[in-house]
Amino acid sequence: MSAQESMEQADHAKEAAGENRKIALLIAVIALCLALSETLGKGAQTESISKNVEASNFWAFFQAKSIRRTVVQTAAEQSKLGLGAIGDDAAKAAAQKQIDDWQKTAARYRSEPETGEGTEQLSERAKHAEEERDLAEAKYHHFELASAAFQIGIVLASATIITGIIALAWISGLLTLAGIAFTALGIFMPHLLHLP
């Protein structure tokens, strides 16, 4: 082997090492982006589950209050029917007072703004929790797509080192940009794209 050939091989080795360093740096950047999107995705998933449980709890409380209100209203209406059969004025007044108390209780079960525990307020709180759940779910789907793009990008960049096909690195870079775009959409505009 001549001196010129060994110089050319050394230059080629330096050039390949330089390219491999660039690819390694690309892989490190993509891995960082992947870690961020995975963290954001896990947080959004946890938020979605939490808000789903919260909404379910509010709806269960709503149903319990509705049942109580129906029972109290039924008792009041039943007592009204028997009110005419009571001959004693004192007993009639006591029965009417009980009916009035039941009607007040039924009205309180329907709307109790001071505690937020009337059926009207519980319904609003449950709907609000459902909206927050849906927002977190939309974010989660975007972060999942971003993570997939980053993972495929890492695989393609790694394949570039093995194969030397630079086009794979370019595709990896494009996937990284797509992943960044999905991450940004998940953070700032999760309802822009309707993902399943």
Image (cartoon, rainbow, N blue to C red):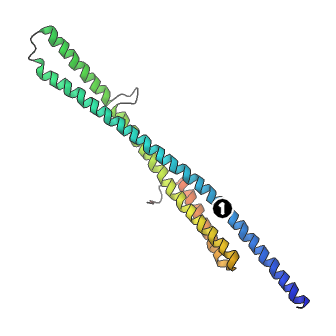
Location of residue 191 in the rendering, given as x and y in whole percent from the top left corner = 47, 55
* Mark 1 secondary-structure assignment: helix
Q: Is residue 89 above or below residue 84?
A: above
Location of residue 69 in the rendering, given as x and y in whole percent from the top left corner = 27, 29
Residue matched to label 1: 31
Instruction: State which quadrant residue 177 falls in.
Output: bottom right
Q: Is residue 187 visible?
A: no
Write the residue at 78% across / 73% down.
18
Write the residue at 39% across / 38% down.
58
The reply, left or right, for residue 105 in relation to residue 55 is left
Q: Amino acid at mark 1?
A: Ala
Q: Residues within 10 Å of mark 1 (few under 14, many from 20)?
A: some
Instruction: State which quadrant residue 185 falls in.
Output: bottom right
Write the residue at 36% across / 39% down.
59
Write the residue at 31% across / 26% down.
108
Q: Is residue 98 visible?
A: yes
How many marks do you count on the picture?
A: 1
- Quadrant where the N terminus is found in the figure: bottom right
Q: Is residue 121 above or below residue 131?
A: above
Instruction: State which quadrant residue 4 falls in.
Output: bottom right
- Quadrant where the C terminus is found in the figure: bottom left
The reply, left or right, for residue 28 in relation to residue 106 is right
Residue furthest to the bottom in view is 2
Pick the front one: 1 or 8: 1
Location of residue 8 in the rendering, given as x and y in whole percent from the top left corner = 84, 85
Q: Is residue 144 above or below residue 71?
A: below
Location of residue 38 in the rendering, given as x and y in whole percent from the top left corner = 58, 56
